[in-house]
Each structure stands twice: as structure tokens, then as C-alpha cells.
Image: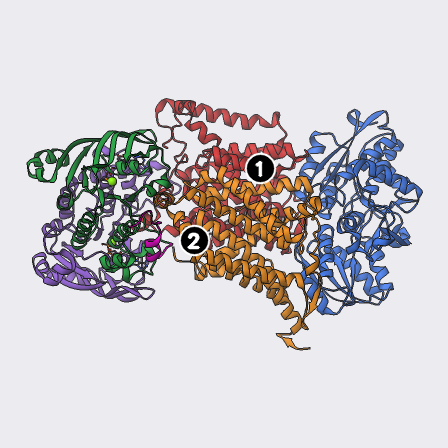
Amino acid sequence: MTAALSEQNGAPRVVLSARGLRRDFGGFTAVNNVNLDVHHARVHALIGPNGAGKTTVFNLLTKFLQPTGGTITLLGEDITRMAPDKVARMGLVRSFQISAVFPHMSVLDNVRVALQRPNGLATQFWKPMSALDGLTAKADQLIRSVGLDKERNSVAADLSYGRKRVLEIATTLALDPKVLLLDEPMAGMGHEDVGMVAEIIREVALERAVLMVEHNLSVVSTLCHHVTVLQRGEILAEGDYANVSADPRVRTAYMGTEEA
Amino acid sequence: DASDGKVKIGILNDQSGVYADFGGKSSYEAALMAVEDFGGKVLGVPVEVITADHQNKADIASNIARQWYDTEQVDSIMELTSSSVGLAVQALSKEKKKITINTGAATTELTGKQCSPYGFHWAYDTHALAVGTGGALVKQGGDSWFFLTADYAFGYSLEENTGNYVKENGGTVVGSVRHPLATTDFSSFLLQAQSSGAKVIGLANAGLDTSNAIKQAAEFGIVQGGQRLAALLFTLAEVHGLGLEAAQGLTLTEGFYWNRNEETAKFGKRFMERTGKMPNMVHAGTYSAVLSYLKAIEKAGSDDGDAVAKELRALPVNDVFAENGKVAENGRMIHDMYLLEVKKPDESKEPWDYFKVLATIPGSEAFIDPAKSGCDLVKS
Amino acid sequence: MTMIFGIPLQAFLGQLLIGLINGSFYALLSLGLAIIFGLLRVINFAHGAQYMLGAFFAWLLLSYFGIGYWPALIVAPLAVGLVGAIIERTMLRRLYSLDPLYGLLFTFGLALTIEGTFRYLYGASGQPYATPATLAGGTNLGFMFLPIYRGWVIAFSLVVCIGTWLVIEKTKLGSYLRAATENPILVQSFGINVPFLLTLTYALGAALAALAGVLAAPIYQVSPLMGSNIIIVVFAVVVVGGMGSIMGAIVTGYLLGVAEGLTKVFYPEASNIVIFVIMAIVLLIRPAGLFGRDV
Amino acid sequence: MKPLLKVSGLNAWYGESHILHGVDMTVGEGEMVTLLGRNGVGKTTTLRSIMGIVRNRKGAIDFAGEDLIKVPLHRVAHRGLGFIPEERGIFSTLSVYENLLLPPAVAKGGMTVDEIFELFPNLHERRNSPGTKLSGGEQQMLAIARILRTGVRMMLLDEPTEGLAPVIVQRIGDVLKTLKERGMTVLLVEQNFRFASKVADRFYLMDHGRMVGEFPVLELSVRMDMLHDVLGV
Amino acid sequence: MFDMTLTLDIDKPSEKKPVVVQTIILAAGLALLVLAPLFFYPVFLMKLLCFALFACAFNLLLGYTGLLSFGHAAFFGGAAYFTAHAVKEWGLPPELGILVGVAGAAFLGAIIGFLAIRRQGIYFAMITLALAQMFYFFCLQAEFTKGEDGIQSVPRGHLFGFIDLSQSTNMYYFVLGVFIIGVAIIWRIIHSPFGMILKSIRENETRAVSLGYSVRNYKLAAFVMSAALTGLAGGIKALVFQFATLTDVSWQMSGEVILMTLLGGIGTLIGPLFGAGLVVTLQNYLATSEFPVTIITGLVFMVCVLLFRRGIVGEFYNSRLGRKLGFEHRH
Ligand SMILES: Nc1ncnc2c1ncn2[C@@H]1O[C@H](COP(=O)(O)OP(=O)(O)OP(=O)(O)O)[C@@H](O)[C@H]1O
Ligand SMILES: Nc1ncnc2c1ncn2[C@@H]1O[C@H](COP(=O)(O)OP(=O)(O)OP(=O)(O)O)[C@@H](O)[C@H]1O
Ligand SMILES: [Mg+2]
Ligand SMILES: [Mg+2]
């Protein structure tokens, strides 16, 4: 409700926000006092050195981990204690740092499985498989949009690593999420795919919020509207890429002295 | 005359489980001996004996029995160790109008509420054990009892029969504890029995369970502490398994002892030659049951269930197992039982010389008066 | 007489002690299971059978070769360990690359075969095994009569458990073993002979089970069924303790033994299921088990 | 330069699929060679075949005068060859410290634990936590550090920079340079071309299970076209 | 979760022509079952069908959800007890008695499943085993189960009030009918949108969660369905043998059904039917022989796991003939 109002005022509305987020592992604090606002129709990058807590933040936001402290709000609703599948159903969907597909299903079926839930075709144990035929067209469209047409009928396990990541993005998009969390979507991808995936992300971000972790700074610089830098679990700097990358603290902590 | 050209007897019992020594394969041998002694033929047709292991499972037993009747032309089934098996097969046989003669199971139910016109109970029962072993110990001053009871029908029946007997004779039952079949560790039950202060600890279980309990009682110094053990169902086979050292001094009740007289000893030796061990009451009882069955067929001139059942009730039983035994209306074969004591190792003069006969318990005392058995076959 | 919760002190302490003795067996067995599982990712269903084998070896040694308890305490575990090694080398090893459930199924079949064979050969009824003369008799502790042999079982099992734990957790060998569980190929590429390590592990686990078997022989009879009677309870112990945690297996073994012993005092009918009930409760509260890591 | 590793006519298979079709390459003593190629051309497979992890292979792998084809996997390390896999292979049941100490030293001259902790302070800080609780980058450092201890003569390094922050990549580059100064031989598989160009002496270019090109770092600029064709850089 | 080298996919024809062949095979199979009592001992056939249905229901969980339950005997034996009690003590007609059994098994399945699905893989197997063992001890001690004796002499009664089931032919066709209905239900579940989600959960659970599927609920639903269908098998078994005993709730029974499924082919619809047929025949054959069944059972288990993980039907599907007939499977 509040979110919808703010949009009318012209400013991009906040769809996902975290306040004072904290997570301890034993005595070790992996994430500490993180405040984060993810906006509709924007690509937000979360960068930082290895071990800074980026994946942990993702896990906290998507409820795969329970926060030790702080609150998370999604579309105006407090989701701090919600189950991960429920959060996903509310429209917050993630990809994984290590590719996650259904290995022994065809590419088409991978996408259709994702389409089943939003189309209310998941619990019908009494209906025949042909009930799913209606999803094929939509699935094909998604497959085409990520350039997997040739592999449509191959088993996901047979795809190369990079293609699997692309497939994962396709299944994620199938849910038509409101907020998309991508953990290193380009990692392990060949050069030919990086550009295409970047293009896909740019496109989907037109009507969705995207939060991504990425080490490929050229991607970050061209794609992202907003960058948050994490270090040792805390926010080190925030702003657009130009500002952040000029920050000397960021340079020493993350980027190093020269562009990689 | 005999249906389908032969008379077929099935020996169905536990041949690999806890009661394998109690009856087991040797019961089959006993049946074969009986057939041979009878001449191998009845009414001019051959007599055949088959056997199977029911692994102490009532359902397996009843499946085998069903199949035997339906597809193998079996005319009667015998031995049937374990109460659950006995009851199940007797019920099935009633439906099929076939004879069962039970020598292995103990429960009085077989000839009580669940009696059958075709079902006979031959060797012993829980009542006889209660009167025999229970009675002996009560007479020796064991007037307070604590029971270790196998947690199933046979155990309850044995505990109840013995408990009643104790109470009728002025004693008390101070407590009881139930243990599952095939318990390996009795120590905590024994401790309970020990702290109950009862004079007698009644072991209302059988086979391996009883042996284990006795062994562990020794470990915990229970007998030294002044309490007595009553192994209510214990036979020659279990004594052999346990060894005289551990078993000495136990009082027990059996319907047969091979070394009781010349005739029994002769039978025992013959049996020994075939099986490598001496017979207990189950083996001798099975011999007797088969013999009596064949006699009844001969007398009836047919192997039809109704005719044979009638003759079995009419004929007296006189063989190596029973002297002047007779079959009551409820199917109970009434005969004398023996109160025995296990010898000390140095008293034993030859292998398998394990028992002293303390007393003979007349059949009328040992077994329930058929009129009071609860069996509706008995006209009152 | 002193009473605790309406139970004579003597009975209470007595049962506590007996619980500890049972716990000793649970601990020894779940320790072996935990080691094999921890390193091979195989749920060794044959553990009960190997425990039984240990007892049977001791019995066979005594009845056919006149070899007594003390040598048997060493020889039987070695022999069973050797059998374990052969099984691992020839069969079990082929299953490592598959889902761990196949290991469970294989050892389940193995257990049936071993038990079936011994039932076939020796019948289901137990064979007696005498308490060694040096440990025969008992002492009156005042509150109970403690058979010396049972006291020995508690003490000895504690020593074995702690010793094994030290080896696995604190030595280089132990860290090789743990690493090899996760990625045998990589560990091998570091220059460590992993196949041999795995064989050794399975042999060690089997030997521990056999050791428990020899310890048990004088208390319970030596019976082909002794293993299958205890194995499922030990499974529950392992689940409660947290799979793969060696310390967890040991501590939970003793704890649940005591819990079971106490149930026998207060509510004997439930003594069979108390361990399973505890398991259910633990699962509700801490699905990973008392000592398990979250997975 | 004396060749330390000489691979000739190496073929390798995964089950039925034939991945390497006669790979030939040489790595000199103390040299740092980088293997470039697109996804799935068989770079990892080459390393795994040399190490002996892929056993279904034919050809000759001469390492310090001995053919490795017949050496069982657990003896290869003792010949002085260390392998750092793409997926890092950190053990979750071992602490960081235990992970570090795991591989047995195969020769003298490896780095000491103190030197390693100096190189990778993160590891020192997290030394008592379970290995896989480290972040991806920390795990990569641990994987490299682990091999540095053992004193091998040659390392096979599979994509060490994948998923690492630029600072860490730089640090790893520095480490590799340090190692080279100490005489370590390295065969590196890398997608990060820029990184590779900073550390390598020589490049091999791979396509479809074969070597399709080879050139020293100095010729890099003139070879750009060929790289473009094969890699699509 | 379960090993993926197995024949995972469903008995699904890939081309048109094989459909004909498969229809013929199916029809022949049905005809065989209808005529079988002319040639075989009906009680044996009924036993076979009961176990086949049991194994198929079990396979719904193992083969299609990837959950290895080591406690299915609880549902099988539990339902047998419930049905037997309902028919014998409450005097219900057979069809209602069986429904009581199914409902009871489903209820038990909900409880055990609720606890067990908190863990995965091997833990799941052990927990189901332990909980089923707990149920076993409950049955051992509960009044209504009659301890070691079991519930004996259960009347078969009259189906729908007029078909006398004590006639073994009538009983046979009743059992056959129930079997066909049971298998049809399983087939439908597997080939449904729901079945698709089950498959995806088995393939990658975390991913399924992130797509918004409440994995626990799906698993629990599959568990309860499998338990209920197992209960159907247990209920008819109680009527066929007029008996309900501890054997059916013992862990050995849980092991047996795994063997049947493994032997026939995990994840194939009709594999368990063959597995059950083989095991039941073997047991029948060995029941009256000297040789203990357990040794053979154990050995078959070991050989299967080591050499024929696909099982009879799975191996057939992968054989040349099987492929020709269109049963080809990936992997
Ligand atoms: N275990 C395996 N079984 C079957 N095929 C495999 C296996 N591992 C890799 N492959 C196939 O072998 C080919 C070469 O793989 P390899 O891992 O060597 O490629 P790579 O050059 O290292 O690629 P990347 O840059 O993605 O790591 C690929 O087509 C891959 O799909
Ligand atoms: N489950 C866990 N238990 C203990 N420590 C953890 C756990 N998960 C993460 N950590 C620690 O938290 C810190 C942050 O890890 P995280 O995976 O979030 O890093 P990251 O920023 O994603 O790094 P990378 O870019 O390398 O993936 C690391 O030091 C890691 O060791
Ligand atoms: Mg990360
Ligand atoms: Mg690679």
C-alpha cells in the first residue's frame, strides 16, 4: 500500500528493505547492521571482497538463513520470520552462486516446473500430465528469450556450466518475480554469454527490482544503478558506481590499485 | 476309507527359532517313528509325514496350513509349538474340518473357550505346569511370588494359572513384570524381582528367555540371596542347553522323562540314535499323538475329520508317553504329569541323565476339569 | 529403606547402574556405526551381525579350540575386522560413488545373509558362554549386588570409546579419514592411499562391533539374533546423538542406556519405546540430533 | 630450458565420450604456462589426466623423466606434482587449520604455516572454523595454501581466480610471482585472460580437445587475432 | 536424492508404434491376471497382488519422490490391524473395513512423515525405521492387537452385502479389482502436475524451495499418499489371510518391500509387481524347505545392489528389446 503510494510521487519505490540485519555463526559475526533498500525497476549491486557476507545477506533476505537480529520488509510486509518458500511465493526469487537446475529434466521441463506454481498447477495429483501443455508456449518463449532454443529438449545435466546458469535465470524469470536476487550470475560464463545475460538483466529490470552480487566490475559499472559495498559484514560504502569506485576505502578493500 | 489314496500328516513347528530345541525337527522324527511303529500304512494306504518351519509366526503357520489343506491333501496337522500358532491353526482347521493335535503349545485356551471339535491338546498345558511346579514350590514354603512374564498370551495364561494356584493355597503374588519375547537382558527385571522381597520368582516364559533369566539370576546372586526361581516351562532340551552347573536344583514339570522306566529309556535311546538327543515331552507327545491318530483312523475306517475326532475321544491312550490317558470332550488328553528336579552335576551318571522324579501328578489334578474349562463342547 | 520418588533407593541405583551397562553396549556399537558412517557414508546395517559375529567367534574359539575369553577379546575383533576388510575390498567399495542409501541396502542384505547362515548352522537359540574366571562373582555395593563382570564392561567400554575418539579427532590419521569421506579422489591426489584407509576404517568399525560382541557373550547368550535385536535401538541412539558425531554417539549411548534403565523402574511397559520416544522429541526440537551439526 | 613435464599424444575419455584428442605440450622447469580456451574445450580434463584423476587416458606423460601413466593416483603427489581443482575441494569436516595441514609434505622446501598465514591473513583469522564455512574466495586461498605447504615442484592450478574479488586476484597474482621466483613450475588454466597475461611466461591455446596454438607472453599483442578467433575475447 | 543412474522416467512411450505394442502387453497382462486362478492357487495369487500393490505404493515414495522409507511395514501392518479390528470387532463390511485401514494408515503416515521429513536421505531412512519400530512395540503391547497372537479368524464378510468373499474366487476378483484401482491411482499421481513437482524436489530440493514450493508439504503429501495406498494393500491382506499379526509391522517386512521394489526396478511403475512376484514365489517355495529364506533374501539383496541396480524391469527397459519396444529411458 505504502509502496504503491510512493510510486505515485515519482520516486522509485522500495520493494525490499532490511534494517539492522545481523547474523552470527557461533562467535563470528558474518553480517552486521546492514541496512539495504532495493528499489523497483533498478539494478542494485552488492559487491565486496570474498567472505564479506554477500551470500549470507542473500540467504538472510530469502530466508534460507534466519537473521540473528534486524528486520526485513518485502512489499510492505514484515518477512523476518517467514519460511523461504512463502517468501518466494510473495515474489522474491533468487539464483544460487553454484548453479541450481533440475539436472535430469529437460530444459523445457525445468522451465515448466517453475511455471506450474504461478499458474496454479502444482498440487493436482488427479490431473493428467497434459494439463501442463498450456504452459509450453510460455516456457518456449522464455527459453527463446535466453537463447536456449537449441537445447530445448536436452537434459539439463548435459549443458555446459554457463548454459546451466542461463537456464537458471530462465526458470527464475518464469516465476515473474517482483524482486530478483542473483548471486554471481556471470561467474563461470564464457565471454559470449556474459553480454547476453547482462542484456537480459537490463531488460527484466525495467519492471522489476534486481539485487545482484557480481565480481565482474565492467558488468557492475554498466548495468547497475546503485552499488553497496560490503566489507567484513558491514556496509563500507554506497552510491552509484562512479562514486563508490572512487572511494579510496573501496579501492584498498576491494578493487585494488588497478582495474582488473 | 482314506481319501485320495493316502493319509498325510503335517508336522508344523518352529525349526529355527527360540523353540527349535524345544520341539523342532526332532518332532518330525518322532512322528516318523510313530508311523514306522504303526507299520507305515493305515486302511491299506500309505501314511506320509511332511514338515515345515513356521518361524514362530502365527500367520506363516496358518498360511502353510491353509496351503497344505488346499493343495497338498494334508489330513491333519500336529505339534504346533507356541500358543499363537496353535490357536490360529486350530481355528483354521475347524473351518476345514481337519484334525489338529497340539503337543507343543501350552495355553489352556485350546481346550477352553476356543476349543474345537477337531482340535486336541496332547502333551501338557499351563494349568499342569502351574499345578506341578507352582504347587511344589508352594508346598516347600514358597508362599510369596513375583512373576517375570513373557508379554503375550502364553505368558499371561501361565502367570494367571500359577498365580491362582498360589493364591488358592494361601500364598500371595507380590508383583509381576512383563518382558517382551526374546529379551536379552533380564537384569533390570531381576532387580525388580529382587527388591520385591518375594520368596519365589516365577519365570512365566519359555525357551531362550527362561535360560537367559536363570543365567542372569545367578550373576546377580539372586539364589544366594535366598530367593528361589521357578522355571515354569522348562524341559530336558533347555536343561541340556543351559548345562547342569547352572540348572541344578531347579524344579520343573514335564509329561515325560526318558529315564523314568525301562520302556521310556528304550524309546529314548531309539530317538537318540535318530536325532542325537533325548526326547522331551513334546517329542514323546508327538509320537503318541501320531500313533493315536492312526489308531483312530483304523478304528473309524476312514480319515474323515468327524469320524476320526469321534474315535480319538473314545480310544484310551496307552503308549510310551501316556499310561491310561484319555481324551476329554473338550479335546484335552488327560494323563499323568511328573514333577522333576534337575540333578547336581555329580549326581548325573550318564549323558542326558538330568532329572530326579519327585512326584507323579495324576492327570485329574494336573488338568482342568473339562466341565469347568469353558469349552462349549462339554455337555454340562 | 531410603526411597526416591517412591522407589527404594536400592532398586533405583541398581537400575541406574544397569542402564549404564546397557549404555556401554549402545555406546560401543553406535561408536562403530558413527565411524563407519562418518568416513564411508555407509549406514552399516550389518553392524548388528558383526556384533553377533564377534560373540560367535569367541564362542567358536572356546568350544572348538579351547581358546578362552582374554585371547578371544583380541582375536575375535581381529578376525571380524579381517572379514570386514574383505567385504569392503570386494563389494562395499563399489558403492561409494552411489547414493549412500545403496550402502544401507547392501549391508542390510549382508546382515540377513550372515544372520541367516548362523541360524541355519546353530539354530536360533543361544549358546552359553561362561564368564571368565578372573571376573566371575560379584561384590555387594551395599545398594546392589554388582557382578564384577558387568563392572568390567562399563570400565572397559569407556576406555575403548575414549581411546577411539582420541584417535579419530586428534590424530593425523583421523583427519585423513575425515577428509577422505568428503572427497576421496582429491585426498588421493594429495598422495594418500585412500582405498586402503577406507578398508581400514570399515575393518575398525567391524572390529569394534565384534569387541562389543565378545564383551556381551558372557552376559547374554551367544545367539544369531542378538545383533538384530539391538541394531535398531542403536540406530535410534545414533539419530539422537547426531549422525557422524563420534562424541555424540558415545555420550548418547550412555545417556540413553541410563534413560532406558530408569524407565524400567518407573514405567516398565514403556522401556522398549522410551528411546524411540526420546528420538521423536529430539527430532522435533533439534532435527540434527543432540550433537549433530546442522545440515 | 629443461622440460619438467612433457605431454604427448594424450587422449582422454569420460565414459564413452572422447574429450582429449592427442594433446601435446611441454612445461619447462620453473616455467609458468597458461592454458587458455573456452568453456568445455577440455582444459580441466587435461589437468585431471596429467594428475591421474582421469584414469581413462592414453599417450605419454613424462614428468621429470618418468611416465606418469602407470603411477597410481596416490603416488603421483610424491613425484612432486600438486593439483588444485576448480571446485577447490575444501573439507567441511576439517577446520581451516586441519585442511591446511592435510596434504602430507612430499619434499622439503614447502612454505611454513607461518609464511602461509602471513600471505593469507583471512585464513589465520578463520583457522578454527570448518573449512566450507569460508567464503568462496577464502576457500580458493586455502586450496592454494594447502599445496604450498607440501613442497611440490609443480602445481596444476585450475581457474584460481574464478569468483574472486579483484584485490584477491591481485594477491594471488603476487603469490604466483613469488612462487616463480622460488623456482616453482606452474601449469595454469585460466579464463581471466588479463590475469594470465600478467603471470604467465607462455600460453597454450586449446580448442576441441587439442592444442591449437602456442606462444610466449612477448608475442601476445601480435597474437590477438588468433585469440579473438578461438576465445571470442 | 536417490541415485539418478536409475531408470527414473516413467513408463512412457516415446513413439506411436510402441504404444500399440505396449497396449498389447498391458492387455495380455490383464488377461493373464483375470485367468490366473484357473492355473494357480488363488490364495497365492492374492498374496502376490497384495504385496505387489504394497511395493507399488512404496515405490511411489522411493522411485518418484526419492525418499527411502524403512518403515513402511507400519502402514502395511497397521492397516491390517485396523481393518481386521473393524471387521471382526465392529462388524463392518469388508469395503468399509478396508477404508478404515486406509484411513488409519494415512493417519499414521501423517504422524511418522511429519517427524521424518525433517531430515533427508539416510537420516530419513533411519528415522522411519526407528519410528516404525516404535509402532511395532506399540502393537506388541496394545490390547486390540492381541500381542503375539495377532487378530485371528477375521471374517471376510460380504462385499456390498451380497458377494460372499469366503469363496476364494470371489475374493480373488475383489483383490484384483482393488489392485488395479490402486495401481491406476499411483499411475495418475505420478503422471500429474503434482508428480512433476515431486520429481523436481527429488532432483534439487533447494532450488524447488527457491521457486516457492513448500517442499515439506509436498513430501508429506507424497508420504501420506504412499502410506494410504500401502494401507490399502495391508487391509486386503488382512481379509485374504483373515489374519493381522506382528509380522506385518516388523522391520523385516519393511526390508522385504524394499527388496521387491529394488528387484523389480525402482522408479518403474510395474517393476515392483515383478519384484513382489519373485519374492513371494521364492518365499512360498522355501517356506517348506530346509533352507532359511533370510539367506536367500539377503543374497538377492546384495547381488541386486551390486549388479542390477535397475532391477528386472529397469534392466529390460534398457536392454535392446526394451528400447525397441519404446521403453527407452535416459541414463
Ligand atoms: N565427469 C564428466 N563426465 C562426462 N563428461 C564430462 C565430465 N566432466 C567434463 N565433461 C565434459 O568434458 C568436456 C570438457 O570438460 P572440461 O571440464 O575439461 O572443460 P574446461 O575446458 O575445463 O571448461 P570450463 O572452462 O567450463 O571449466 C565438456 O564438454 C564437459 O561437458
Ligand atoms: N553457515 C556458516 N557457518 C559459519 N560461517 C559462515 C557460514 N556461512 C558463511 N560463513 C562465513 O561468513 C562469511 C561470509 O560468507 P559469504 O559466503 O556470505 O561471503 P561472500 O561475500 O558471499 O563471499 P564470496 O564472494 O567469496 O562468495 C565468511 O567468512 C564465511 O566463512
Ligand atoms: Mg558468495
Ligand atoms: Mg574447467
Query: Does mark 2's beta carbon lie closer than 8 Å to ligand 2?
Result: no
Residue B112 visible to the viewer: no
Q: Can the viewer see residue A90 in this picture?
A: yes
Q: Mark 1 = which residue?
A: E297
- Foreground: A114 or B124? B124
Q: Which chain is orange?
A: C
Q: How many marks?
A: 2
Q: Is residue C171 above or below residue E237?
A: below
Query: At 49% from the left edge and 54% from the top edge, which residue is drawn?
Result: E111
Q: In the image, what residue type sits under mark 2?
A: Gly
Q: CA distance from mark 2 to mark 1?
A: 36 Å
Q: Is residue D106 magenta?
A: yes
Does residue E309 appear to the left or right of A78 in the view shown? right
Please name the amino acid that badge 1 sits on. Thr
Colour assignment, chain E: red
Q: Residue B99 location, x and y as percent?
A: 79, 38
Chain letter, blue: B
